Image: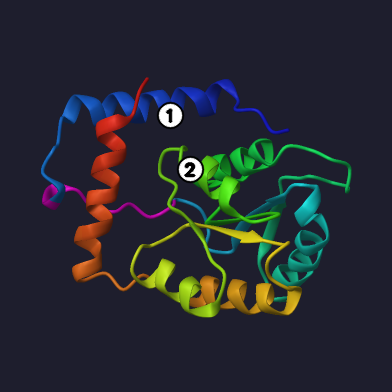
């Protein structure tokens, strides 16, 4: 599993201290920040239940021109989804990946784990409409999928839609700013 380097940990602490010292509580004064990485880097991970789907989606991503960071697992041996969801979320949180994708049996647990990581807005998507909504309305930066609940063809459609849908901004930006304000309010160092 990927571990945070000392430099990465220091960057997170510096960011947290900076945000805590600012003490901004008015959500209207907070802006949504974009990742600092190229918009072609996608981190992807899975547990054993999502391994086959992950391998297929990696091929799709590469053929579409994306650079892929495979965060594991690397085989179908039983493993724990939180380890891999965390690895993908860290890539997104630290700006090393523009977007993240995590696949487990249902997608629920991985979504819960990823949403514990600062700067991550993970969304479990189960159809094209939820994929579009998660990007357009919520500026989701990490997609979770349930390999035991959806087939590969649908997963490919969801991924393509999710990656190609832009954040709508406007009235949605204010709401995403409020999500980020809640994160800052409860961030513990």
What color scheme is it? rainbow
State the separation of the CA atoms marked 2 and 1.
9 Å
| Residues shaded magenta | 28-35
Would residue 132 be found to the left or right of residue 85 on screen?
Answer: left
Per the image, label 1 sits on a secondary structure element best described as helix
Q: What is the quadrant of residue 62 in the picture?
A: bottom right
User: Which residue is at the front of the view, 127 or 175?
Assistant: 127
The quadrant of the rendering that contains the N terminus is: top right
Name the disc covering residue 88, or none: none
The quadrant of the rendering that contains the C terminus is: top left
Q: What is the quadrant of residue 133 in the picture?
A: bottom left
Q: Are marks 2 and 1 in contact (CB under 8 Å)?
A: yes
Q: Can you give x and y, in whole percent of width and height, for residue 64 in the image?
A: 68, 76
Q: Is residue 118 above or below residue 111?
A: above
User: Does residue 178 show up magenta in the picture?
Assistant: no
- The residue under the point 36% across, 70% down is 167
Mark 2 Cα-neighbour bin, 10 Å: few <14, some 14–19, many ≥20: many
User: Does residue 33 show up magenta in the picture?
Assistant: yes
- Decide which of tag 2 and tag 1 comes sooner along the chain: 1
Mark 1 Cα-neighbour bin, 10 Å: few <14, some 14–19, many ≥20: some
Q: Is residue 143 above or below residue 62?
A: above
- The residue under the point 28% across, 56% down is 176
Q: Can you give x and y, in whole percent of width and height, for residue 166 in the image?
A: 41, 73
Q: Is residue 51 above or below residue 18?
A: below
Name the disc covering residue 12, or none: 1
Would residue 165 be found to the left or right of residue 167 on screen?
Answer: right
Q: So how many labels did they put on this image? A: 2
User: Which residue is at the front of the view, 93 or 176?
Assistant: 176
Name the disc covering residue 93, or none: 2
- The residue under the point 60% across, 28% down is 4
Q: Can you give x and y, in whole percent of width and height, for residue 164 in the image?
A: 51, 76
Principal SS element in the magenta part?
loop
């Amino acid at each position: 599993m990927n571990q945070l380097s000392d430099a990465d940990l220091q960057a997170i602490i510096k960011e947290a201290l900076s945000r805590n010292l600012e003490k901004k509580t008015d959500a209207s004064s907070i802006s949504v920040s974009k990742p600092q990485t190229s918009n072609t880097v996608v981190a992807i991970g899975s547990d054993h239940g999502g391994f086959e789907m992950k391998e297929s989606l990696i091929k799709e991503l590469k053929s579409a021109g994306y650079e892929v960071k495979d965060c594991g697992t690397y085989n179908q041996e039983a493993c724990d989804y939180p380890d891999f969801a965390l690895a993908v979320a860290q890539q997104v949180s630290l700006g090393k990946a523009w977007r993240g994708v995590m696949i487990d049996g249902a997608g629920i647990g991985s979504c819960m784990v990823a949403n514990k990581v600062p700067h991550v807005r993970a969304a479990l998507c189960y159809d094209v409409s939820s994929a579009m909504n998660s990007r357009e309305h919520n500026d989701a930066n990490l997609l979770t999928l349930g390999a035991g609940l959806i087939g590969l063809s649908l997963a490919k459609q969801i991924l393509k839609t999710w990656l190609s849908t832009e954040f709508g901004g406007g009235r949605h930006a204010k709401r995403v700013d409020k999500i980020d304000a809640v994160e800052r309010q409860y961030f513990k160092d």
